[in-house]
Image (cartoon, rainbow, N blue to C red):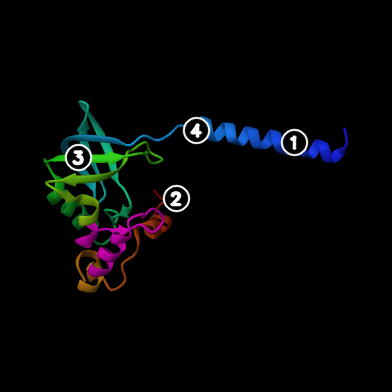
Amino acid sequence: MNRQFHNVITLYATLLFAVGLALAAPVRAQQTATGPVTGVSDGDTFYMTIDGRAVRVRLAQIDAPEKAQPFGRRAEQSLRDLIGKRQVTVTWTQADQYGRPVVQAEADGVNVNAEQVRRGFAWAWPRYTTDPRLLDWQAEARAARRGLWADPNPVEPWVWRQVHRKGGR
């Protein structure tokens, strides 16, 4: 076999293998659940009952200050005010590195993720934000100096975690 023919066969086999992997990859189905909130961990994480068991969930596309950060406890209280002891509907397609569903949450007709940003108690997380309206609501909260934006130099949680914890979230 000449070298050029061998290279073509190798390329063809590699492409077939890659296509096979892509076709075999699981399709992430959207999941939805409704249940009562049983606790709030911080400004972007809470517990709810899904199918009879307590599940810790993480709000998608946003990042709230950590508890030890300025406005961390206020962000937690804001989330508690929004969803505490209420029925919440969550929708997700994936889990984070800790196995928590990363959700869009709605309570009493309110988009909880967006409301935390509107109130100034969470950032639209640039790394994960797919809804450009979150950036607009963040800009409005910042201009109005709502929540954490009252601080002249707020530190993004993902930056704060790099400094204060090994490995971050």
Among the two numbered marks 1 and 2 on one chain, the one whose residue lies closer to the N terminus = 1
For numbered disc 1, what is the local secondary structure? helix
Please indicate whether residue 41 sits to the left or right of residue 86 in the image. Answer: right
Residue 86, image x, y percentages: 11, 41
Res 66 quadrant in image: bottom left
Residue that numbered label 1 is attached to: 10
Helix, strand or loop for disc 3: strand
Between disc 3 and disc 4, the foreground one is 4
Would you name the residue on which mark 4 appears?
25
Extreme residue toward the right, this view = 2
Report which quarter residue 150 is drawn in.
bottom left
Confirm or deny contact between disc 4 and disc 2 (CB under 8 A). Answer: no
Q: What are the residue bounds of the magenta stretch?
A: 116-140
Circle 4/circle 1 CB separation < 8 Å: no
> Which residue is the site of mark 2?
166
**Which callout, 2 or 3, points to the residue nearer the camera?**
3
Mark 3 → mark 1, Cα distance in angstroms = 50 Å
Q: Give the amino acid type for the residue marked by disc 4 in the picture.
A: Ala
Q: CA distance from mark 4 to mark 2?
A: 32 Å
Q: Which residue is mark 3?
A: 89
Residue displayed at 26% across by 49% down: 44
User: Mark 1 against mark 2, which lies toward the viewer?
Assistant: 1
Binning the other alpha carbons within 10 Å of mark 1 as few (below 14), some (14 to 19) or many (20 upward) gives few
Q: At which x and y percent is residue 20? A: 58, 31
